[in-house]
Amino acid sequence: MSATSADAPPPQAAPVAAPAAVPVRARRRGVELSLTVAAVLVSVYGYAEVGLATAGRVPPGAAGYGAGLALLAVLAHLAVRARAPYADPLLLPIAVLLNGVGLVLIYRLDLAPVLGPRAAPAQLVWSTLGVALFIAVVLALDDHRVLARYSYLGVTAALALMAAPIFFPAVNGAKIWIRFAGLSFQPGEFAKVLLAVFFAAYLSANRAALAYTGRKILGLRLLQLPTGRVLGPVLTIWLLSVGLLVLERDLGTSLLFFGLFVVMLYVATGRTAWVAVGLLLSAAGAFAVGSLEPHVHGRVEDWLHPFASVRAGLGPGQLAQSLYAFGDGAVLGTGLGQGHSELIGFAAKSDFILATAGEELGLAGLCALLALYALLVARGLRAGLALRDPFGRLLAVGLATIVALQVFVITGGVTDLIPLTGMAMPFLAQGGSSVVTNWIIVALLIRVSDSARRPPPPEDPP
Amino acid sequence: MTRCIRRCAALTALLLVALLVNAVRVMVVESGTYAKDPANRRIAIARYDRPRGGILVGARPVTGSRDTGGQLAYTRTYRDGPLYAPVTGFASQTYGTSLLEGTEDGLLAGTSPQLASVPLWSEITRDRQRPGDVHTTIDAAAQQAAYAGLAGRRGAVAALDPATGRILALVSSPSYDPGLLAGTGPEVAEQWRRLNDDPAQPMLDRAIRQTYPPGSTFKVVTAAAALESGAVTDLGAPTRSPDPYRLPGTTWSLTNEGRGCADASVLDAFRVSCNTVFAKLGADVGLAAMVRQAEAFGFNDTRLRIPPGVAKSNFDRTMSPDQVALSSIGQFDTTATPLQMAMVAAAVGNGGELMRPYLVDRVTNHGGAVVQHTRPQPLHRAVSQGTAARLRQLMEAVVSDGTGTNAAIPGAVVGGKTGTAQHGVGNKGTPYAWFISYARPLGSSRASVAVAVVVEDAEAARADISGGGSAAPIARAVMQAVLAAPPRP
């Protein structure tokens, strides 16, 4: 089905032979299953490959790992098959493959003792939890529009979650963690889904008011601002969330929220001027933070001169190590387990995990991963195009934007395209909150894509 | 709304393109630059992530590798480190490489293209070549005999196979264990500092890197020049040589330690090492012929590689006649490495043909196939066959009935020459005793071993006359070790 047809008015049902007039849409569940199985096989192959390359034998846990991953994938598939039969067949396989490759990369980095204790088993547990939540969302959520009803509740929860780490000690300079009973969470990760839901609900409810009312500035409709009544709540929420993150020194996530807000506002209102204002504001904000905050200033300096510390005789910094790793990968990579991304040291399993992918899988592997993310985003946007209800459209766009911005910011950061901001590569990076959140995002995308592709209910015969 | 979503999609596509273009920049365009950056530890890690190839003496490796479990996994180990240090040098993770470890590094580390089996395929799979093994020409028995003979005294021994140029022994004393420098860390730095600060210079490879005044051993070269130039035709005929001999153009008189040098024949003068006779002979032959002869034996060669570079042995090209006279008895500016003097003895023992000395017999790859083989090559014709025969007569007389009787070996013919090297300010340092010699089996005109020994010896000044002092017995032990071995196939 083409995306444009979705926006066209629903076909007029012919009075006779009604079933034939409704286009029969393929459910494509078989495609999803086979792709999911392929994703599991690729992941298990990667796992075996790490063992073969480093120890000369298949890791003892390979069968268990494969069986576990396959079980999770099949359960997720069955849930989709049962409750979202028209969902986009690419979403689940992409998520399984990215999660599987992420586990392989973390398992591989676990082999380097310098990078700290093993993280793959915990990541597997978190992935299981993520898939469980995915299944729960797919089973429990019949219609995404239900979410709009709870948007204020959701955003209150989001702000509470984001405020909570203030009362916990900072980890590596950022107060973004909650430590509780030996477990740690990054509540900001969960908050971004809730914020996307809230923005979608609020913006879809107030679209017309936002776009067409308010006073003009300098007599230009282009710069027409909505009234405070309309814009107030959403702006307040957004300022609160970004302000909290700045307080907690989590600049990557605040950047993400800002971008998310601007994109959703633009899609809701179609006002290019606001995008321009948003970009100007973010540029000004980035410049101010970049000059005033020493930590961020250092990141900008690193970005401009990644090898300055080498020339100063202090040895390569993290970004330089990351670039060495990518460079070592070249076109085809060293092969899993045969690179030396452990030289990156701190955060090699989280923020810098893509450097391991680049080094060991090469430009080919990196392109494949980016293509997977691009497909995920494209499928999200496509569901947005196909849907008819504004809330669903905005939600799909918002979720896709979260993934897209995150991938861009962290990939650009570790490859020296933009200044580095700490952020988790979706599904790949070590981090329980992140992987769970990403599974929820995919579950919501499954749900909206199911609504988008589901044929309209047959009209009652006259 | 649809249009806006489409624009969003276009924007994300743009971001993707930016990421991909930048990835190509980092991973393809800059890849080579990053790989060569010394701050990139991958070079060092790859270098040490497998055992280094072995350096072999005979069939037995004298080096090994030990897995430290660290980031730079394998460090070098040495069996009999001090004994073979002048051959192997060191391979250190901190201080680089020296001697054979340095010149053969590409083969030992496995980076040399000579080791490549299937070039294109290994490029794709990134399979690294396995290191090769370096088989030296060293004769373990000769090396041990030389090292034991020096017994810790300062000195050096170089031994050659005259017919091929194979270096059979290369010993420097005092020595050091290169294994102390193999790894990284403060203790390695400490050892490095200690070895460099040691006044005894244990890391100096005296056999090829230190030059000494050759003293009377240089008389072989002077005799060769005299015979080749025709200045002397009859070894037994008396020369017109005063004792003491006043150096030409000076008021300085040269004397001898012993007596009977006035008008002595070349044979007698060589046998008892008369300074006056050979100084005058050198002056009579003249600068040009002396320089030509010295260079025919290998002096003034800055480019000799065995493959480690050998220090230049010096014979000045511009000198006044009195300086030529002094230089002709191995004094003034004349200096020689022990290897150089072994080459002199070897050329005489090999019928006048000087073979290029070499230390690496062959290099094998991991599978044992030979990837590099050194063939014996002539370096120069030092003297004619006839001159060589008469020089042998002189040198054999030294051992049978002269200053070098300590070097005699039953069942073999030995020719030699003693010498003394003074050094230090005003020659106050403990002098070095020299002995150069060759040995040939009875009935053969070709020598099978040539050796040069230089050893610090308080008695050296008199040892020159009184019988080879401490140097000749060391030379004898080395020659015996070689002669005792079954001939090489």
Image (cartoon, rainbow, N blue to C red):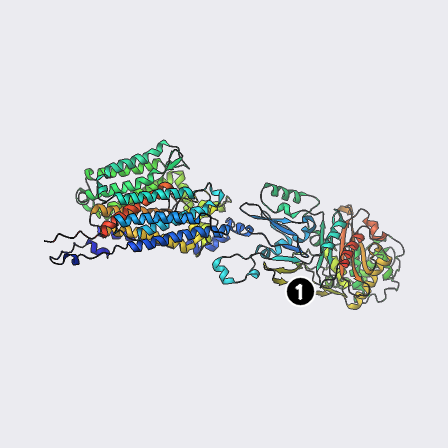
Q: Residue at x 36, y 51 (%)?
A: A97
Q: Is residue A245 left or right of residue A200?
A: right
Q: Foreground residue, B143 or A422?
A: B143
Residue located beneath label 1 in the image: B375
Residue drawn where x is 59% and y is 58% of the image: B366
* Placement of B97 over or under B222, stated as above or below: above
The residue furthest top is A167
> Residue type at mark 1?
Arg
Which residue is outermost to the left? A462
Quadrant including the N terminus of chain A: bottom left
- Of B314 and B377, nearer the camera is B377
**In this figure, what is the number of numbered marks?**
1
Q: Position of residue A69 (x, y in %)?
A: 38, 48
> Viewer-proximal residue, B160 or A210?
B160
Above or below B364: residue A415: above
Question: Is residue A217 in view?
Answer: no
Residue at mark 1: chain: B
**In this orientation, does residue A456 appear?**
yes
Determine the image quadrant of residue A30.
Answer: bottom left
Q: Is residue B465 left or right of residue A364?
A: right
Residue A394 x %, y %:
24, 46
Q: Secondary structure at mark 1?
A: loop
Q: Position of residue A9 (x, y in %)?
A: 16, 54
Q: Nearer the viewer, residue B378 or B375?
A: B375
The picture places residue A361, in percent across and down from the top left corner, at: 43, 53
Q: Quick one: label 1, few (<14), some, or many (20+) residues within 10 Å?
A: some
Q: Residue at x 60, y 62 (%)?
A: B369
